[in-house]
Image (tube, rainbow, N blue to C red):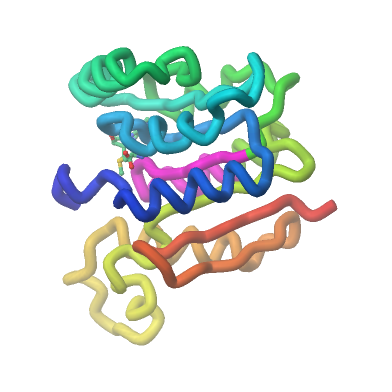
């Protein structure tokens, strides 16, 4: 994926903001900060929601982390965003899970999605009414072609990884889910009661 395309669109940012507002989510975890754009969209929805309202965002690239830090600090929303540097797989293992997240936005390396999903569930990081928003579920339209294509060598690895993630989640009895064919494909997931 080209760097410019890694960022969500402004409409998707508005959609995330809308979801946060209607679900009354206060604690948001983002896996994949990049320049900080989506973290800022989500932080906008948390303004005036109290001292526990926060976006925690994870990034492992030091250049992107630096750029995002500058963007977030100059935005006026920095008090609503906590940035954590490092491999998200490690960071997630070290979270204090006494405070749960109401929304987990997964938007990092596609090969890591199954790990992030499992860690969030197994470490009990999601609140009872919370939900996971996994981005790029259709990865440029490639994902829907994976089951009907014999030679997958031309497909980007990310598309194969997202197909594997979708299959994994769809067959997982711990959660309910829906794959929305909007943006680049969105998998919305909630724990079963
Ligand atoms: C698609 S971009 C995120 C875009 C951002 N959410 C937005 O819309 O503004 C993915 C980001 O995840 C980061 N990333 C990839 N693998 C990671 C890992 N293992 N741990 C933490 N961050 C990772 C990449 O460096 C990149 O900045």
Residue at 16% across, 43% down? 3
Is 108 covered by the magenta stretch?
yes
Find residue 82 and report its horizontal and vertical position in percent. 47, 17
Residue at 37% across, 49% down? 110
Find residue 73 and report its horizontal and vertical position in percent. 32, 13
From the viewer's perspective, is residue 111 above or below residue 170? Answer: above
Answer with the quadrant where ligand 1 appears in the image.
top left
Image side of residue 54 versus residue 171, left or right: left
For the residue pair 178 and 147, the one nearer the viewer reads as 178
Residue farthest to the right? 193
For the residue pair 36 and 166, the one nearer the viewer reads as 36
Image side of residue 187 versus residue 192, left or right: left
Find residue 135 and report its horizontal and vertical position in percent. 42, 53
Residue at 35% across, 26% down? 59
From the viewer's perspective, is residue 70 above or below residue 165? Answer: above
Find residue 51 and report its horizontal and vertical position in percent. 64, 14
For the residue pair 169 and 83, the one nearer the viewer reads as 83
Image side of residue 193 versus residue 72, left or right: right
- Locate residue 94: give its quadrant: top right
Residue at 75% across, 19% down? 98
From the viewer's perspective, is residue 165 above or below residue 74? Answer: below
Image side of residue 144 versus residue 64, left or right: right
Segment colored magenta: 103-117
């Amino acid at each position: 994926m080209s760097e410019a395309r890694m960022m969500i669109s402004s409409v998707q940012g508005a959609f995330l903001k809308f979801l946060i507002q209607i679900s009354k989510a206060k604690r948001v975890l983002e896996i994949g900060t990049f320049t900080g754009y989506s973290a800022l969209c989500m932080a906008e929805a948390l303004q005036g929601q109290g001292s526990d309202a926060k976006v925690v965002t994870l990034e492992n690239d030091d250049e992107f982390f630096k750029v995002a830090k500058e963007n977030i600090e100059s935005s006026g929303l920095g008090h609503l965003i906590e940035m954590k540097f490092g491999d998200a797989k490690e960071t997630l293992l070290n979270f204090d899970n006494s405070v749960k997240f109401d929304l987990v936005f997964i938007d990092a390396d596609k090969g890591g999605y199954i790990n992030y999903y499992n860690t969030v569930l197994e470490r009990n990081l999601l609140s009872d009414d919370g939900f996971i928003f996994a981005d790029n579920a259709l990865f440029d339209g490639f994902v829907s072609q994976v089951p009907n294509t014999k030679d997958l060598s031309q497909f980007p690895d990310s598309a194969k990884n997202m197909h594997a993630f979708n299959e994994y989640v769809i067959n997982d009895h711990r959660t309910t889910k829906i794959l929305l064919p909007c943006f680049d494909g969105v998998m919305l997931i909630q724990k079963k009661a």
